[in-house]
Amino acid sequence: LNSSTDQCKDIANTMFRLRPKRHSGCVFSLHLPALKAAALKGIDLRGLRVSIHAAFHDAHEKHRYSNVAFQTWRLEFATATLGQEQTLLQMAIRCGQPDMIRYLVDAGCE
């Protein structure tokens, strides 16, 4: 059970991406194709939990950009939530992604 739980955490933490903003900073967001791929593989999105630190680190490693804004950007979540695991729906809300919120609600996520 423990390795299964760890695998689910690893999967959830890889569903994010970073994109540079036009003028400064970056956008940290859930990536819809990654969610759909997980759902097609039979992964229950409702039970997945995200470690914000791990998700950000994974996205940062996968999506490196050369602009200065990306290199100096910092994750802007309330410090109190950084150590807590979040559901995918909570992350979609925090990332301000209404289309992702609808998708996750339709999938039965809370």
Image: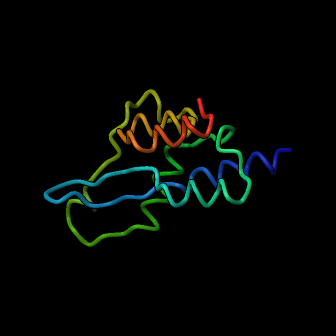
* Residue 62 percent location from the top left of the image: 46, 68
Left or right: 97 in relation to 39: left
Residue in the foreground of this view, choosing between 104 and 79: 104
Camera-side residue: 107 or 80?
107
- Residue at point 13%, 58% (across, down): 23
Quadrant location of residue 97?
A: top left
Q: Write down the quadrant of residue 22 in the picture.
A: bottom left
Tell me the residue at 57%/52% (across/down).
13
Which image quarter: residue 50? top right
Q: How is the image coloured?
A: rainbow
Furthest-bottom residue in this view: 66
Q: Write the residue at 35% across / 38% down.
A: 96
Left or right for 3, reference 13: right
Give percent across and percent down for residue 72.
25, 56
The residue most toward the left is 23
Does residue 95 sit above or below 31 in this rendering? above
Indicate the quadrant containing the N terminus: top left, top right, bottom left or bottom right: top right
Q: Position of residue 60 (x, y in %)?
A: 42, 61
Numbered disc total: 0
* Residue at the right extreme of this rendering: 1
Q: Is residue 74 left or right of residue 108?
A: left
> Who's the residue at 48% across and 55% down the image?
32
Quarter of the figure with the C terminus: top right
